[in-house]
Image (cartoon, rainbow, N blue to C red):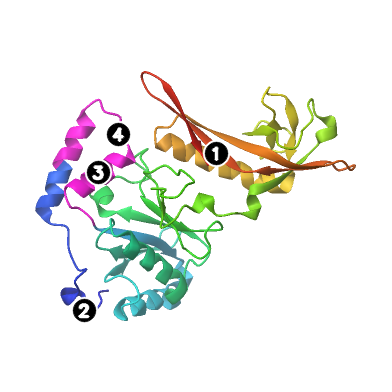
């Protein structure tokens, strides 16, 4: 479906066949080289060759298509979304795939506006993370089933951003500071979050005590026989202080795992999750609160650089 003003809209554009062909030629040459390919190569090639189209991807269940697809169609016709959307003819196991297009992925304001409109005007995917895929990635025949490369470039939404206020660029690194290139228009990592405060339990059974102001490290412990989501807390000497309370660990452990995998996709060596003890209580159920913090370690041929994200 197209907006009636598609042909006359100033934002209406198409990726030319010549530009797509030139990008494909350079991409195929890169694949034959010994260079380690990353998602950033796709971004750079798409930008260089002006292959800028992309789309927000969402799924509509087969039994909801009669009610939900008209919402998308009407929003396109009414000018509330982008200029074009399409839906797959047949559903897969997740439902019908819907693509809501944006003509220029470098126009982050427009990409973010469309995501907000999907939530606010269409009323779909209100609390979910949506992912944005470049047509350049599709043209390169890169899909989750045939490539180890990340296939989507932007994320927006989810429990950390329920208002869809921030566009996450997955080829950039979050600096948790003003001017962060990963988060647009401002760094999502700088926003205070209650879920980043964790109670530590089991202190009276631990090998070390915790003092206010002490720096600690949080480590996933998937081999823990009592809880595969366990997250242990150790001091600077590596001695166990305790474990994150089980309820919080159930969400924290997958979060750490996801960040680790994300850093690996950016060719960063590892992720270390650090915290600071900001309070200690001495009752039967001892607990401490930890402020969430990240450190990533990037290795190259000559040195190891520690990048502190704060």
Mark 2–mark 1 Cα distance, whole angstroms, equals 47 Å
Q: Which numbered disc, 1 or 4, marks the residue closer to the eye?
A: 1
Marks 2/3 in contact by CB < 8 Å: the verdict is no
- Counting other residues with Cα less than 10 Å from the Cα at mark 4, is it few (<14), some (14-19), or many (20 or more)? some
Left or right: 256 as drawn, with respect to 110: right
Which residue occupies the extreme left position in the image? 18
Q: Which mark is residue 58?
A: none
Q: State the image quarter where residue 234 is shown.
A: top right
Residue occupied by mark 3: 44
Marks 2/4 in contact by CB < 8 Å: the verdict is no
Marks 3/1 in contact by CB < 8 Å: the verdict is no
Q: State the image quarter where residue 77 is shown.
A: bottom left
Mark 3–mark 4 Cα distance, whole angstroms, equals 12 Å
Residue occupied by mark 4: 37
> Which residues are drawn in magenta?
25-52
Which badge, 1 or 4, is on the more N-terminal residue?
Answer: 4
Asked if the stretch drawn in magenta spans residue 141, the answer is no
Residue occupied by mark 1: 294
Which residue occupies the extreme right position in the image? 284
Mark 3–mark 1 Cα distance, whole angstroms, equals 27 Å
Marks 1/4 in contact by CB < 8 Å: the verdict is no
Left or right: 101 as drawn, with respect to 168: left
Residue 69 x, y percent position in the rendering = 39, 74
Residue 72 x, y percent position in the rendering = 37, 74
Q: Could you tell me which residue is drawn at 29 percent across and 60 percent down?
A: 107
Q: Nearer the viewer, residue 78 or 98?
A: 78
Residue occupied by mark 2: 5
């Amino acid at each position: 479906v197209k907006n009636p003003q598609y042909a006359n809209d100033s934002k209406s554009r198409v990726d030319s066949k010549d530009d797509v062909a030139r990008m494909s030629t350079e991409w195929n040459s890169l694949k034959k080289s010994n260079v380690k390919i990353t998602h950033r190569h796709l971004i750079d090639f798409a930008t260089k060759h002006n292959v800028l189209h992309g789309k927000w991807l969402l799924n509509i269940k087969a039994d909801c298509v009669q009610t939900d697809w008209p919402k998308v169609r009407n929003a396109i016709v009414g000018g509330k979304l982008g200029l074009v959307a399409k839906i797959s003819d047949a559903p897969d196991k997740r439902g019908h795939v819907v693509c809501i297009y944006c003509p220029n992925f470098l126009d982050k304001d427009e990409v973010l506006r469309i995501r907000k409109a999907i939530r606010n005007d269409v009323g779909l995917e209100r609390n979910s993370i949506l992912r944005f895929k470049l047509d350049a990635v599709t043209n390169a025949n890169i899909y989750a089933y045939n490539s180890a490369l990340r296939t989507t470039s932007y994320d927006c939404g989810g429990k950390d951003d329920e208002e869809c206020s921030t566009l996450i660029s997955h080829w950039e690194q979050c600096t948790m500071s003003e001017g962060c290139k990963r988060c647009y228009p401002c760094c999502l990592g700088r926003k205070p979050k209650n879920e980043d405060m964790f109670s530590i339990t089991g202190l009276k059974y631990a090998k070390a005590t915790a003092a206010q102001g002490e720096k600690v490290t949080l480590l996933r412990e998937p081999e823990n026989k009592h809880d595969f989501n366990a997250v242990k807390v150790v001091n600077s000497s590596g001695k166990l202080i305790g474990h994150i309370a089980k309820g919080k660990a159930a969400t924290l452990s997958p979060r750490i795992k996801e960040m680790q995998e994300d850093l690996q996709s950016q060719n960063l060596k590892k992720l270390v999750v650090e915290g600071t003890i900001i309070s200690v209580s001495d009752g039967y159920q001892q607990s401490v609160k930890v402020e969430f913090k990240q450190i990533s370690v990037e290795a190259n041929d000559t040195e190891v650089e520690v990048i502190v994200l704060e």
